[in-house]
Image (tube, coloured by chain):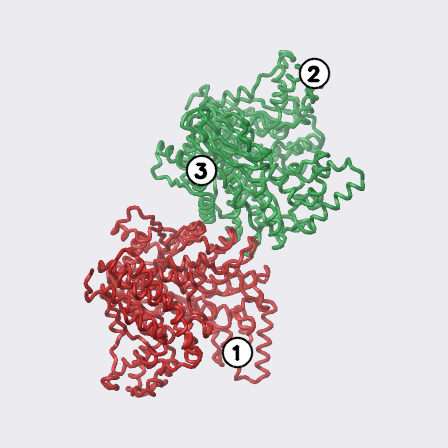
Chain colours: A red, B green
């Protein structure tokens, strides 16, 4: 038996809302089980409240003070022994932050109010400290590696046995993807690899030769640097063409962008779509809209909001002008046909990586104004990645909808580390205010890349660090080897960036033993086609992709295979050797907390935690040569499989099995497996009594858990609940608690 | 200067109808030019009349007797020095043969009548002799090699400058190809390679174990032998599904087979379609139809013909029943909407290799009953090759119609020698009369392949000889090298036959120097996709394909590139080293002859002859190290290019430039090029006077040629015209004749 060492440690994050409450029930089970295998499970509080408190130590009593756990975890990610289970946390908006502050103040924490408009130095300091808590503050600190996402065997088996619905495909479907055939980022992309480290300047040169340095970026040796632009004129013509085609063909029009992630470029693209669709409105009321502060990049919602200040008659006139546009424009896909919310209402409503798989799953159709589903032109201006959707549409049109009961899987190894590629481009994206030249210039004055641009064009640069690529290649080889699965590097010979990457891939593949592995490099169209052809024959193919494709593919394929991407394993093998195991793509679920507060029923599904923990244990076992940990992992996977098969996932209805009941069943199956296995007699003996106790008391425990439901529950806080109260609410079964304690 | 040797000889075939008349004008020009390069041009008469006369030497006077030129040419194909220009000839039907006999008899040839129902031994002998002249009797004797088809540079340049019309493609087109997903030949194909020569028996074993030998086939060592079957039940369900889908989707239904070439299997497939479409009619009148001798394999035409013997009222009843079917069936594509001739009328009306390119060129649409074009489901039951059309439809749907002004070319190297593959399967195709097993058994009793079959299933076997494959590989390497063009072997890893072929290809590629060549092996879908992706970027890609694909691809791509496949160079490099240069895919054009007889205008376009002659000269030059021949070839190609560019091809209208005028211009451009070139001063000097004479007399000659038109022309016969009369009709310009004679 392996002696526990200080390295055999799992860090389990305490976060917010539903996942945090679920942890209150699940963590005691985890600790009971893992301690038997000599594994310590520590917690780390990265809730909004903890991060707020960490910002103001000097204002708190010694007892109230908390350490800066996020910073600590950031350090931990550099430790090769890092083994971190990361649950969903709140990416706080300002209203959420203010609510958290108020709650903490009411609990006696002397923290300052959030200064909306700071004037004094002190207020500015306060705002700066709070700003660290805002938005997506956790992932950038913790995601110090590339991405490994896959469907766990238990989840795949569940989908095969209980397949989700898939809309039938007609071979005569008119639906298709449409994208620019020139003038987009894809067409203009240039890319260089830095021979040595150094600064580059992103410069705009106007028609008179005046140079404006937009930004200076420090680049590493071997770093790939791309620049590209989208022509505003080409974009507008493209939108006009797509609209006219839809009108002529009687096909619905829909726009798919990712304004949330590509948060500088895509809202601008969205704004162009709004201006072209409602061309007459913007031509007639353009000046008025400017006065009112209408920003088409925020969607038609912005128009409706801003014109509310106008006299009623003028509002009606504008609304009539808007309605007049619908006469000569094609039907537009609706986000909510009941409420009349169109595709152009709010830029974040239709997010390509979720909306396109949904459309494809739904027979290639979207919802029209009349609430009926219709064939659709899916408009995705940037052609780089849009082509993969056209491939899948063609494939389904020819071969029919995918069959979840027989289809193979497409796991992903994604280049994510160090803000790779377009997803790190926000601070290097510019909308041109005049005609001229954008160029990338080395410190010595060498012009690396340049583009002639026009007013309104969107220019951007992206970085990809050599170390990230090298690690990504390694991860791909490792995953291909471990899973005995062919892997395809999705690198398009027609993309400047991908040609640079291909050189690196070929170079770094030589660092590995690839004997017997099936590793290929293909353009996107061929890669997805090959993967789909294998998939419908039940074969798996790893997609080894860049960052945006990672994002898209880890929704696209899981939604076809599993009906959701939330059931995927999401692992971040850290650059330095550690690992982070992310759970639940579904956010932190505020509505779930409401239900607990009102009727003490938690419908949060901890499947993600089960899966993450199993991989965490497996990795820990492999790294520390701890076969017990590996056995625990195997047993947990088996238990998860049984849980799915027996449908012991939480119900949405009060009185029925909830998150806690689901945890009980997991514990029972887990213990049963360990008690019955013959690999390790010691563990079998240790878990036999627990298995017996839980099995014999199944009805009793389920009843105790059910009895707890039905009335309001007091958690002692929302952002910063009382731990004792949470414990009481989340562990209401004495029989279960006793059985665990006996272990 | 090379001395002419006996090998430096071109054999020019004399055939029938329009091409023969054109030869009357063109051949004197050819002879005048080639003799200057030391090349002899001999003729060989393979007209129907000559072949008839060759059959009855004993009944003719010594003067009347002709030699068996076809047999002589057959021998010539085995000679490495063979250089044969083959013009289109009549594949005689019985009525045509009878007309030829009558004409010869009237000219004093004592040949017997054709005995329709021979009873005596003598009559049987006569019929046997005549049967050698019937049908496609020439190609099997002469095509002793694989196939090399390509668009000549002059033709390609012409298409780029004067592009043919291409229908626009909508991205929302509903058109698609549909094919069986199981139960077809593709799904059941088995294939073996013979380790040693020997006989195999094709046996049917019934349910009681009784064995019936259907056929015994002698196979060579290394020969590939395939067997496969199409399930009648699966075929019927497939047709029913496609009909229901069309009805539901509002898309037109059309059937595409090749009953002319796959003359056993495809008429049966066609018959199934007829029976399924008009299910109620055949259910109700099945017995009556059988009595009447209705054969659905001959199309609905057979029904209409046969019911004519019935009382009027019964005819009307059946016609009403037929019309009732249209109520619940989808709209069917029409062959002739004016005459009401549907897709199911006559099996040879819609021939897949011509009809599918036409549909794709026509925006993916076919003609409906109302004479309007509509989106269509193109039904091609056998999935083996149908998938390439679906790929092209998808491609056009995504990327728009091909652009003849910029697109590259897809030349073909086709496996054709020794009746390769399915095109040699007619005598080994059987429709099952009962359930049982079909098997292929070696002489020693070893069962090589077997299939469980049901009544009505179509079973067939195909042969591919090793020597043919070996030569095909060599031809592919040679063409890739000579044209500096990548070549793709279209071999599908999912096809049993292709897997056998792939082994041979890999083996035989090693016999060649492939250094620096881009030779790849791909499945059909990927092969066509790759070729199209290159094509729209202006790049050429050789398709190296099997026999059926050869047939399909040499229509499909030329129709996209050139608007017709008739302008392709069609070369048969003989297995023994010689070469045949085929001209004009458009048949021998009886209507053209009528026009000559009525108004002395020949609209036949000799472009095919120009192209074939140029390659013939080039090959002859290379083989005999005769640079003058190569120069003549280069000059001829240039002249052809100029002819096309200046639009000096024949007009269809009397009084305008016809075939003879076109020949004059060719001669003029050819002479001008030779006179002006500086490679060979001797030739330049020799052709200078001719160039001068023709250039100076252009108007005069054109006028002389025009003056000859307008009244009836006497050719002294149709099948066996008078040579002197033909000469007089076809060479009416004294100025031109004198100039040529002076050379």
The percent position of residue A39, horizontal first and vertical second, equals 24, 66
Label number found at residue B498: 3
Q: Which of the image's four quarters has the N terminus of chain B?
A: top left
Percent from the top left, x then y, of residue B7?
Answer: 45, 21
- CA gap, disc 1 and disc 3: 63 Å
Callout 3: chain: B
Q: To which quarter of the image does residue A18 belong?
A: bottom left
Point out the frontmost of discs 1 and 2.
1
**CA separation, marks 1 and 2?**
97 Å
A735 is higher (above) or lower (below) than A644: below
Image location (x, y in percent) of residue A543: 37, 55
Numbered circle sitting on residue A724: none
Residue drawn 59% across and 73% down? A323
How dense is the environment of label 1, judged by Cα within 10 Å: few (below 14), some, or many (20 and up)? some
Dot 3 falls on a residue whose secondary structure is: helix
**Regarding mark 1 in the picture, which secondary structure is present there?**
helix
Position of A330 with respect to B514 (left or right) is right
Is disc 1 in contact with disc 3, using a CB cutoff of under 8 Å? no
Which chain contains the residue that carries disc 1? A
Of A743 and B231, which appears nearest the observer? A743
Residue B108 bears which disc, if any?
Answer: 2
User: What residue would you read off at disc 1?
Assistant: A304
């Amino acid at each position: 038996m392996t002696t526990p060492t200080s390295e055999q440690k799992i860090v389990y994050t305490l976060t917010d809302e539903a996942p945090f409450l679920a942890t209150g029930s699940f963590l005691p089970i985890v600790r009971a089980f893992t301690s038997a295998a000599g594994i310590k499970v520590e917690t780390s509080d990265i809730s909004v409240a903890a991060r707020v408190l960490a910002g103001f130590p000097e204002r708190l009593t010694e007892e109230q003070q908390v350490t800066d756990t996020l910073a600590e975890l950031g350090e931990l990610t550099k430790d090769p022994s890092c083994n971190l289970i990361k649950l969903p946390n709140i990416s706080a908006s300002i209203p959420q932050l203010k609510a958290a502050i108020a709650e903490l103040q009411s609990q006696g924490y002397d923290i300052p109010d959030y200064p909306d408009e700071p004037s004094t130095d002190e207020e500015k300091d306060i705002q700066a400290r709070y700003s660290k808590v805002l938005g997506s503050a956790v992932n950038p600190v913790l995601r110090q590696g590339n991405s490994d996402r896959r469907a766990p065997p238990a989840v795949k088996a569940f989908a095969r046995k209980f397949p989700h619905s898939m809309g039938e495909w007609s071979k005569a479907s008119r639906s298709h993807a449409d994208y620019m055939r020139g003038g987009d980022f894809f067409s203009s992309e240039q890319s260089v690899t830095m021979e040595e480290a150094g600064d580059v300047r992103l410069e705009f040169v106007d028609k008179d030769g005046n140079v404006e340095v937009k930004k200076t970026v420090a680049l590493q040796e071997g770093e790939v640097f791309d620049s590209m632009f989208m022509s505003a004129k080409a974009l507008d013509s493209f939108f006009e063409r797509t609209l006219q085609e839809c009108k002529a063909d009687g096909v619905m029009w829909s726009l798919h962008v990712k304004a949330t992630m590509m948060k500088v470029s895509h809202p601008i693209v969205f704004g162009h779509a709004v201006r072209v669709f409602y061309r007459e409105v913007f031509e007639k009321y353009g000046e008025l809209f400017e006065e009112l502060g209408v920003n088409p990049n925020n969607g038609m919602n912005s128009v409706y909001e801003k014109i509310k200040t106008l006299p009623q008659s003028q509002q009606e006139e504008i609304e009539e002008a808007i309605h007049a546009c619908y006469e000569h424009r094609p039907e537009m896909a609706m986000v909510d046909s009941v409420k009349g919310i169109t595709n152009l209402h709010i830029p974040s409503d239709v997010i390509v990586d979720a909306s396109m798989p949904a459309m494809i799953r739904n027979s290639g159709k979207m919802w029209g104004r009349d609430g009926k589903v219709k064939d659709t032109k899916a408009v995705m201006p940037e052609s780089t990645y849009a082509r993969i959707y056209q491939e899948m549409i063609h494939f389904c049109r020819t071969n029919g909808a995918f069959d979840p009961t027989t289809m193979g899987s497409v796991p992903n190894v994604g280049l994510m580390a160090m803000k790779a590629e377009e997803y790190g481009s926000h601070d290097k994206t510019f909308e041109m205010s005049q005609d001229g030249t954008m160029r990338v210039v080395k410190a010595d004055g060498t012009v690396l890349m340049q583009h002639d641009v026009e007013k309104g064009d969107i220019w951007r640069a992206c970085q990809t660090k050599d170390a990230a690529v090298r690690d990504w290649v390694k991860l791909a080889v490792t995953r291909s080897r471990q899973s005995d699965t062919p892997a395809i590097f999705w690198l398009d010979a027609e993309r400047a960036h991908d040609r640079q990457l291909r050189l690196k891939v070929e170079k770094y593949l030589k660092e590995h033993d690839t004997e017997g592995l099936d590793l290929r490099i293909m353009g996107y169209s061929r890669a997805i086609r090959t993967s789909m052809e294998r998939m419908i024959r039940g074969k798996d193919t790893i997609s080894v992709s860049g960052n945006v494709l990672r994002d898209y593919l880890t929704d696209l394929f899981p939604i076809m295979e599993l009906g959701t991407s939330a059931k995927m394993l999401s692992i971040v093998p850290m650059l330095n050797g550690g690992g982070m195991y992310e759970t639940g793509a579904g956010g932190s679920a505020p509505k779930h907390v409401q239900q607990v507060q009102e009727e003490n029923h938690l419908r949060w599904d901890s499947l993600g935690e089960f899966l993450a923990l199993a991989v965490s244990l497996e990795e820990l076992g492999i790294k520390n040569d701890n076969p017990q940990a590996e056995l625990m992992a195997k047993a947990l996977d088996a238990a998860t499989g049984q849980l799915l098969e027996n449908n012991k996932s939480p119900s949405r209805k009060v009185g029925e099995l909830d998150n806690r009941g689901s945890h009980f069943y997991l514990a029972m199956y887990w213990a049963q497996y360990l008690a019955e296995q013959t690999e390790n007699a010691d563990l079998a003996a240790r878990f036999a009594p627990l298995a017996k106790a839980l099995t014999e008391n199944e009805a009793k425990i389920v009843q105790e858990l059910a009895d707890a439901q039905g009335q309001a529950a007091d958690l002692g806080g929302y952002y910063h609940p009382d731990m004792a109260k949470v414990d009481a609410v989340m562990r209401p079964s004495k029989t279960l608690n006793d059985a665990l304690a006996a272990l």
